[in-house]
Amino acid sequence: MPDEIVDDASEAGLPLDAPAALTLDILRHSAAHLMAAAVVDLYPGTKYDVGPPIEDGFFYNFRLPDARHFSDSDLGDIEARMRKLVKQRIPFEREVLPRSDARALFERMQQPFKLDIIDGLDDTVDSVGVYRTGEFVNLCRGPHVPDTSLLGAFKLQRVAGVYWRGDERNEQLQRVYGTAWFTEAELDAYLARLAEAERRDHRRIGRELELFHFDATAPGMAYLLPNGVIVFNQLIDYSRAEHRRRGYREISTPVVNEKHLWEISGHWDHYRENMFLIPVDEQTTYGTKPMNCPNAMVVYNLRRHSYRELPVRYADWGVLHRFERSGTLHGMLRVRKFQQDDAHIFITEEQIEAESVRVLDIVRHFYGLFDLKYSFRLGTRPDDFMGDVETWERAEASLLHILEEHAGPGGFAVDAGEGSFYGPKIDIMMEDAIGRSWQLGTVQLDFQLPRRFGCLYIDSDGAEQTPVVIHRAIYGSLERFIGVLIEHFAGHLPLWLAPVQCELIPVQDDKPEVLAYIDEVAGRLSAAGLRVDVNHRPGERMQAKVRDAELRRVPYVVVIGKRDVERQDDVVRVRDVRRESREDDSTVAALVERLRSEAEERRPA
RNA sequence: GCCGACGUAGCUCAGUGGUAGAGCAGCGGUUUCGUAAACCGCUGGCCGGGAGUUCGAAUCUCCCCGUCGGCUCCA
């Protein structure tokens, strides 16, 4: 689903003048009213909350009478009632009421959510807008369509539970989502787009291409199958080489630590509910690591450090476990076990800016390889923060400055309260096939952990100083990164990542000279470091093998038959699956070179 | 965790109280074919798990597990 903005203010206040043209937002907002009108008709006594337009559609939140709950089968009834109201051409009647009259009105109608909105309005507001659509009366600024007959191309999609005002301590209401468009054709196009997105779904493609598997005994913990491991290792190998080049040194640390470590780091107080805990006896509890940082601190503290050594950069590819709530898991994009291209950099405060820039440079470099579109998000001090406010503000100011320099004003979003408990962060955000936003890479400033672990360096004047730590990951979680890549490329991974890079298919599988020649070509390709498969399955027609290779997203397919053997000219026919070029004559020598350079340069598909 | 939906063969799905089905995949044959599916045959199921209702349950009820869409939470 798209991001939803529940803007209570849009539901209240004075009506806005209708613009000259009908916009999708107005249409959808009106469709939300229409739906609420239908629900109030069908289920008298329903309490209604808010119902704004959102990307591609609208929703409305309800509490049904008698603790009743909507189920999917109710959507058809509601939709039918909506269509009936459309036929009746019910006007959207606008009215401006003094605040006290509006309050009395909703009091009479027993609409507690509306009363709550009115009571929450600023003291300066003395009159508010009210819209009527048949029996449905709503506190609303509008604008709306003149009457219900202008609404037609809509469809109710699903029902969801939502916490009132987005706070899980509040009661849960039910939200009905719908989509609405100017025309039926646009509605159909939208539904077709959803179907297309489903074809790109990494969970489907991951199963079809045998990349990974989820077992019921390990929810949220992917098994990487042989094909998936190739992708995973290629990404890791590349990242390892790049980081080595940039002065990172790799460490490998325990997956489980005794709880004392987590007490020192603050995870015990701030992150325990997200950790897998292992009680080993009455006195002792271990916790699987949700992050690598505490162990990096342990390694740093093994000896004294001079200011001359900084930055000290420790990369750690350790396996992390986080106990995510069951309802939040989502294929490879939200898991309980994952690996990051993680690193912790110990620096002086003066080095923050230069080192952050170096990190963002890696981001640019890596993401450029995949033509990925990403955006930055600054996460600031959360409610449950560690340390003191002044340090936080200093760190936030540093990151803000860096973003302004490197993303430009407006090139990033600020998400208040979304920082980590130990420091503010810059997140790199990407969208999946259906437009949901996911965090991949991250750059986090940390003044807290080095202090808690007593990390030190000796400054030029001989005094002990506490270093600052940058936590950073470029891919972020490899699992998530692979999931996003699959959706981005619809399974057609760049050549350097493809499990099988080139498949050779014999036209006749009963001709020894054809099979011998195919083996020779395969040998030349694999000698160049390429991952090659020969489809030897007997009895199957060449066309079926081609189709099968296409479905497995093998980037290059070469068909070889007796005519190629007879010609003895080194020329074969190549199918470039991703560019959908059907046949392409090429000498084997040229083919080897073409694939080798494409893989070596890591060109995107 | 919460609201809703779903769980039938390796995959995609049909089957709504009366003997578990289809296509693809797999296996065995026949076919040797020049760029997206040759033909014939055969295997294959604790109908997610448990309890209940019933003469009888894939089908109805309850509990649990998992998955999906949201909410909340987050890489």
Image (spheres, grey):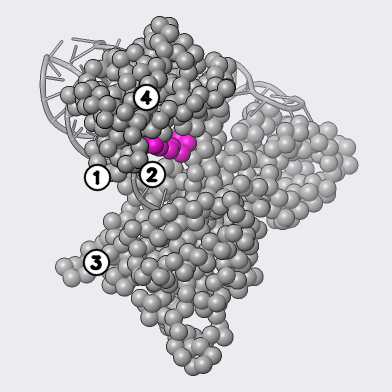
- Disc 1 chain ID: A
Mark 3 Cα-neighbour bin, 10 Å: few <14, some 14–19, many ≥20: some
Give the mark, 3 or 2, whose residue is nearer the N terminus. Answer: 3
Please indicate whether residue A324 sits to the left or right of residue A583 in the image: left
- Disc 4 chain ID: A
Image location (x, y in percent) of residue A437: 49, 44
Q: Going by the picture, which residue comes out furthest to the top?
A: A88
What's under tag 3, amino acid-wise? Answer: Thr
Please indicate whether residue A307 sits to the left or right of residue A5 in the image: right
Q: Secondary structure at mark 4?
A: strand
Give the residues drawn in magenta, as a range: A1-9
Give the labeled residue for mark 2: A329
Give the labeled residue for mark 4: A96
* A18 part of magenta stretch: no
Which mark's residue is nearer the viewer, 3 or 2? 2
Give the mark, 2 or 1, whose residue is nearer the N terminus. Answer: 1
| Residue A63 appears in the picture as rendered | no
What's under tag 2, amino acid-wise? Answer: Leu
State yes or no: discs 2 and 1 in contact (Cβ < 8 Å): no
Along the viewing direction, whichever of A321 and A216 lies nearer the viewer: A321
Q: Residue at 43%, 37% (x, y): give it.
A: A4
Report the Cα–Cα distance between label 3 and label 2: 26 Å
State yes or no: discs 1 and 3 in contact (Cβ < 8 Å): no
Which mark's residue is nearer the viewer, 1 or 4? 4
Mark 4 Cα-neighbour bin, 10 Å: few <14, some 14–19, many ≥20: some
Give the labeled residue for mark 1: A169
Figure check: A243 above or below A174: below
> Which quadrant of the figure contains the C terminus of chain A?
top right
Report the Cα–Cα distance between label 1 and label 3: 30 Å
